[in-house]
Structures are given as C-alpha cells and as structure tokens.
C-alpha cells in the first residue's frame, strides 16, 4: 500500500489457488495433471507448490506420462515441502 511517498513494506502477498483442466474440443480424454498444495512455514507464513503437467497432445499414454511426471516431481520435493522444514530463507531462494 502506498501512503504519500511511502510504501509499506510489511504488506504480504496473499495467493488463492484453484485448478481446472479441460480435454479441449478434439480429444476424448483429458491428459493433463494439476497439483496444488499450500503448507504453513514455521514463521507463520505459508508456501505453495503449484504444478501443471500437460498431456502429450493425444500421443499414446499422454495421461499416464503427465500423471507420472507430476507424481515424480511431488515425490522429489516432498521431503522439503511436506516436512515443514522449508524455512523462509529456503523459500526465498527458489
């Protein structure tokens, strides 16, 4: 917020997240995978992991590829993200 020539530095960004995928008009199967999760940090703030894995345009097993990709990425980040060890300093680096 700006008051006169002063910008208040303690204002925090608030994020709301939602997801939706659509198979489109040419496909019979939606091959996309989305993931969103927000966890609290130890300092009272929160951090979010938001992921979109797009299908492969109707190629064989595009839905499986996007799901496996999402699962692998989430699994790789789970130790940091879900253990709540993601400190503010770690969050600022990413």
Image (cartoon, rainbow, N blue to C red):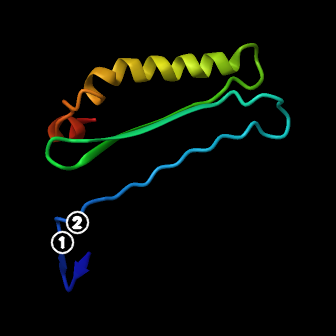
Q: Secondary structure at mark 2?
A: loop
Mark 2 closeness class: few <14, some 14–19, many ≥20 residues within 10 Å: few
Q: Which residue lies at the image location 26% right of the left edge and 25% below the top edge?
A: 80
Q: Position of residue 19 (x, y in %)?
A: 56, 44
The total of numbered circles placed on residues is 2
Is there a contact, CB below 8 Å, between mark 2 and mark 1?
yes
Q: Quadrant of residue 22?
A: top right
Q: Secondary structure at mark 1?
A: loop
Seen in the image, is 91 located left or right of residue 42? right
Residue identifier under label 2: 11
> Where residue 8 is drawn, which disc sits there?
1
Q: Quadrant of residue 31?
A: top right
| Screen quadrant of the N terminus | bottom left
Q: Position of residue 34 (x, y in %)?
A: 55, 34
Q: Which residue lies at the image location 43% right of the left edge and 54% below the top edge?
A: 16
Q: Nearer the viewer, residue 90 or 21?
A: 21
Q: Position of residue 44 (x, y in %)?
A: 18, 49
Seen in the image, is 14 located left or right of residue 50? left
Residue that lies at the very extreme toward the top in this rendered image: 60
Task: Name above or below for residue 86 compared with residue 38.
Answer: above
| Screen quadrant of the C terminus | top left
Mark 1 closeness class: few <14, some 14–19, many ≥20 residues within 10 Å: few
Q: Which residue lies at the image location 21% right of the left edge and 33% below the top edge?
A: 86
Q: Quadrant of residue 87?
A: top left
Q: Position of residue 23 (x, y in %)?
A: 75, 36
């Amino acid at each position: 917020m700006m008051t006169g020539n002063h910008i208040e530095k303690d204002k925090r960004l608030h994020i709301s997240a939602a997801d939706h995928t659509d198979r489109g008009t040419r496909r019979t199967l939606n091959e996309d995978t989305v993931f969103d999760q927000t966890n609290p940090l130890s300092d009272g703030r929160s951090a979010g992991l938001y992921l979109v894995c797009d299908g492969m345009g109707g190629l064989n097993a595009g839905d499986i590829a996007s799901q496996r990709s999402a699962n692998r990425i989430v699994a790789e980040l789970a130790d940091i993200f879900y253990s709540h060890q993601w400190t503010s300093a770690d969050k600022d680096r990413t």
